[in-house]
Image: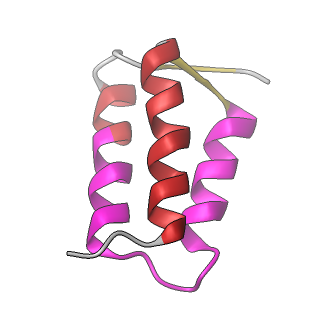
Amino acid sequence: MAVTDSGRKLAELIKKAIDDGKITTTEYEQIIFLAEEDGKIDAHEKSLLANLQEMISNGSVKRIPG
């Protein structure tokens, strides 16, 4: 599966959130915007988003205001 430019950028943003252990509302919105920017969410992007959502759900990554 080829990784798109938006997929690489998305991975970088998500990695930062995972490394920090937190994600602001603004960062989360940037991630969603980037994923939807090209009009389609490919399998790689879906996987990245699912991993992030799971980490938010289980508390590994905390959503914080900002």
* Residue plotted at (37% across, 63% down): 45
Whole-percent x, y for residue 32 in the image: 58, 57
Magenta stretch contains residue 44: yes
Quarter of the image holding residue 37?
bottom right
Q: Compared to 49, does 64 lie above or below? A: above
Nearer the observer, 24 or 6: 6
Question: In the picture, which quadrant includes the C terminus?
Answer: top right
Whole-percent x, y for residue 42 in the image: 35, 76
Question: In the picture, which quadrant includes the N terminus?
Answer: bottom left
Whole-percent x, y for residue 31 in the image: 59, 51
Q: Compared to 17, does 39 lie above or below? A: below
Per the picture, the main secondary structure of the magenta-coloured stretch is helix
Q: Is residue 11 left or right of residue 24?
A: left
Q: Residue furthest right?
A: 66
* Residue plotted at (68% across, 48% down): 29
Colour convention: secondary structure
Magenta stretch contains residue 17: no
Q: Compared to 27, does 40 lie above or below? A: below
* Residue plotted at (34% across, 51% down): 48
Nearer the observer, 13 or 2: 2
How many numbered discs, if any? 0
Whole-percent x, y for residue 49 in the image: 38, 51
Q: Residue furthest bottom?
A: 39
Part of the protein shown in magenta? 25-51
